[in-house]
Amino acid sequence: MKALFIGGTGTISSAITRQLAEDSSWELYLINRGTRSKELPPGVKVIEADIHQEAEVAAKLEGHTFDVVADFIAFEPAQLERDVRLFAGKTKQFMFISSASAYQTPLSDYRITEGTPLSNPYWAYSRNKIACEEYLMQQYREQGFPITIVRPSHTYDERSIPLGVHGNKGSWQVAQRMLENKPVLIHGDGSSLWTLTHNSDFAKGFIGLMGNLHAIGESVHITSDESVTWNQIHEIIADALGVKLRAVHVASDFLADNGPYDFRGGLLGDKANTVVFDNSKLKRLVPGFTATVRVDQGIRQTVEHILAHPELQEADPEFDVWCDRVVEAMEAAAKLMRE
């Protein structure tokens, strides 16, 4: 079997790449610009090209056909229009990585199935993913283009601690605040349920869909069955760091209205809402699939990895100062109410 990934080195795709490289039944190619080729496992073939340069990519793919093509870095319909031009008639299955944030927000039922409506008025990112899905379904229905749509939720790896409130430079600054005994922000009251999926578990589900004739024309999400609260997530992080959590709870809409960060999309349009995923469809398509990395295990592995790799500890002083201002505002409001 022969597969081509557009991307292949990101949080989600890197685990799939590693697992496929160990499977002798798959021959894996990646299209990327080669900036992270040294991190790839042996046997993975790289086609160095910029996917946005369609003519260049078409020339380099001349003579190739694939059992599976997966695009991990498409965010707008125009990018998928390019993919259809490049791969129509050249692949038996085209897999598009959408997003679970495309599901109805706010939800009419906290339990999410693939039949949950797609609608997100809070986040342009999610609306673009919805538009991508609609375009691909049209191509499947009208042209027979063999699509499979995959919707990840919050998927993490060893390089970034999964959080809801963080700055533009990743999650390390929140961990640093914990280590310095400074208060950290948790959106809402921290009791809403959330689902975290380790990328190694996501990879198992994704690979099970590859070359799967029953997945053609289908949309399916891949998540863990485990649900935890944001308070529990932060307690797990603090415990992994060996410190006591000092939490400050702040309304999500306050954060969205009073910060330089996209919390309207990332919180109101996603992480502020309780979500519980029904993975029945995935388990029908991939018998035996089970997510096996518990949240406490996965986060501890991530924290240990980041502590052992200083290059992943990117400071974000602007976010740190902003957190202090929010904490001061909450303390001032509480003091005013007591007077």
Image (cartoon, rainbow, N blue to C red):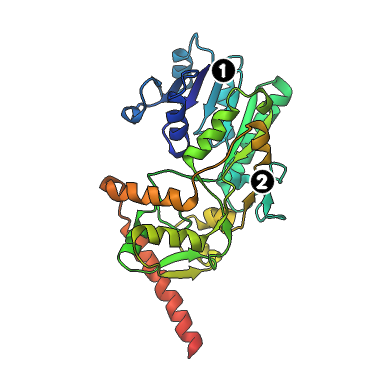
Residue 134 visible within the image: no
Residue 180 x/y as whole percent: 30, 66
Residue 10 visible within the image: yes
Label 1 secondary element: loop
Residue at image location 52% in from the left, 53% down from the top: 266
Q: On the image, which quarter does residue 264 sit in?
A: bottom right
Q: Is residue 177 shown left or right of residue 215?
A: left
What is the crowding at mark 2: few (fewer than 14 residues within 10 Å), some, or many (at least 20)? some
Residue at image location 42% in from the left, 51% down from the top: 299
Residue 158 x/y as whole percent: 39, 44
Amino acid type of disc 1? Asp
Between 80 and 170, the residue placed more toward the observer is: 170
Instruction: Identify residue for label 1.
Output: 67
Between 1 and 176, the residue placed more toward the observer is: 1
Residue 311 x/y as whole percent: 27, 45
Amino acid type of disc 2? Asp
Instruction: Identify residue for label 2.
Output: 278
Q: Measured along the vertical axis of the image, is residue 198 above or below residue 28?
A: below
Q: Is residue 127 shown left or right of residue 244?
A: right
Q: Can you name the residue that lies furthest to the bottom here?
A: 339
Q: Measured along the vertical axis of the image, is residue 83 above or below residue 262?
A: above
Residue at image location 64% in from the left, 26% down from the top: 147
Res 45 label: none
Q: Can you name the residue that lies furthest to the top here?
A: 63
Residue at image location 60% in from the left, 29% down from the top: 209
Label 2 secondary element: loop
